[in-house]
Image (spheres, grey):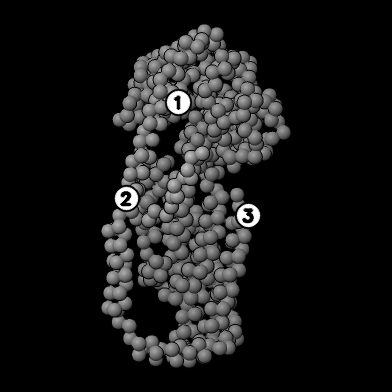
Amino acid sequence: MLRITDLTKRYGTGELVLKGLTLEIGGAGLTAIIGSSGAGKSTLLRCINRLVEPTSGSIVVDGVDVTGLRGRRLRHARRSIGMIFQGFNLIDRLSVMENVLSGRLGYVGFAQALTRRYPQADIDRAFTLLERVGLQDFVNTRADTLSGGQRQRVGVVRALMQDPKILLADEPTASLDPKTSQQIMSLTRELSEELSLPVLVNIHNVHQAKEFADRVVGLRYGTIIFDGAGSDLDDAALDRIYEGTAGRGDEHGDETVGADARGGTVASP
Amino acid sequence: MSAAPPKRTWRKPPAIANPVLRYGLLGLTFGYLYWAVASLPFDWNRIVQGFPRAVRIFGNAIPPEFARSQLMITGFTESIQMAIIATLIGVALSVPVAVMAARTISPTPVYLLGRAIIILARSFHPVIVAIIFVKAVGFGALAGILTLIVYSLGFVGKLLAEAIEEVDYGQIEAIRASGAGYFKVLVYAVFPQILPRQVGLSIYQLDSNLRASAVVGVVGAGGIGGTLMNAFRRFDYDFALAILMVLIAIILVSEGISGRIRRGLT
């Protein structure tokens, strides 16, 4: 379904964020990607639908190598890759239905999109999915009046409207309270099973990764250093994934203290 | 117990830390002011003579003369028509120009072209643009409308381009991720975000065009400004005062209405 080979990414002239990463996702099931901030989780996900341009390597989604695609062929490839975002990224000023139908933008013509005249099949599917996530009473509500959990459910429905072959979720619960976060994870898990859809989730919460994922991938400084079942993720593995990140924080703290001290000497005369 | 802590004082640090720079700038400012006042030709005699003349003129203007209301109505109607037409066309043109001039969503050559159009439209005061158009298309409302279109395009285009550059990029990312192309991204992710700004700016611009339409009339570009200029030329100060009073009333009313509408937008 998804095969990533020797993927590297460098922003500008900086360090490599992804260092020759190779990963294969087979059929349905939820794969969690864990790792500290800056490990490259978001970059990895965004390379798959080319919101971020990979530096080298290949990414094959459903038999198509998406690296190097341009224009119409890139847009067609993106249709089969749904994405859920940390900040929901709904169009605040549009209604729930318009947000949901925007998942079909890769399929409809420009005039249809402009006038909101979507095919009946799309509208039927939108209603079915909205009912599935319990938002059937909010069809014409403006997206920015919903609660965080409701917004993310709209985000999930929008991604599923694309009829994706794979679903990417970039920290889908990081902006939610613990209870709602749990609900969104179970919903994602259920929908993944119902639609037999492979799901790739970036996640900060290790407990949720263990609870909901069939497979956990640990990323550290752009390299995969753990790949296995959630039950294999013991303290030793977690130490390796998150090791050193606390130390870096301490160094940063020392620098700040130093800067303060210098500031003091300048001000005193 | 330990002794009382030492008494410490605190003063707000000066805005410019370097004392040489601080007092130097202060000295320069006052030095320039002294030089400017001393070197400009302030002729006290002319100022003293001017006051009685001003009093005489304003004396003639009172009471204002509203008898030639037909002339006034014709002038104001033309001004308002000019303002409305110019706002509609100018705002419509400003949208594509603003999209071009937004660095975040346009490729560099297009961005530079968009910026160039805006800079050109904004570099001259409407009165100067009006003089050019009066030379080009002759006296009358057409020159005024063209002037106000340029004025609206420059102002709304610039502020709208800034609004586009400030939109939430996440929404653009989400629409792009669905496989939408450039124009669908504009319609779904960009325009909804700038819509309140767009409506607010358009109403403000209508207001502003109403004011400017009176000014450009002075140089022959139609509207109430022409009537006002004629009144001054014929020393009909009472009629001129009547026109000015109506103008102020119209501007106050339009400002009130536009302010209220813009407050209601979210």
Distance, label 3 to label 1, CA atoms, is 42 Å
The chain letter under disc 1 is A
Q: Residue at x 64, y 23 (%)?
A: A183
How far separated are the C-alphas under marks 2 and 1? 41 Å
Q: Reading the chain from its start, which is encountered first: label 2 or label 1?
A: 1
Query: Which mark lies nearer to you, 2 or 1?
Result: 2
Q: Is residue B146 above or below residue A96?
A: below
Label 3: chain? B
Q: Is residue B241 left or right of residue A184?
A: left
Whether pointer 3 and pointer 2 mark residues with C-beta atoms closer than 8 Å, the reply is no
In the image, what residue type sits under mark 1?
Ser
* Residue A115 pos. (x, y %): 59, 41
Kind of residue at badge 3: Gly
Q: Say which quarter of the image contains residue B16.
A: bottom left
Q: Are marks 2 and 1 on the same chain?
A: yes
- The residue tagged 3 is B264
Q: What secondary structure is marked by label 2? A: loop
Q: Amino acid at mark 2?
A: Pro
Residue A37 badge: 1
| Residue B22 in view, yes or no | yes
Nearer the observer: mark 3 or 2; the answer is: 2
Task: Find numbered disc 3 in the image and state the secondary structure of the residue it sits on.
Answer: helix
User: Is residue A39 visible in the rendered structure shown here?
Assistant: no
Residue A239 location, x and y as percent?
46, 14
Q: Residue at x 57, y 35 (%)?
A: A90
Q: Which residue is mark 2?
A: A269
Per the image, label 1 sits on a secondary structure element best described as loop
Residue in view at x 56 percent, y 78 percent: B245
Is B32 situated left or right of A133 in this image?
left
Chain bearing mark 2: A
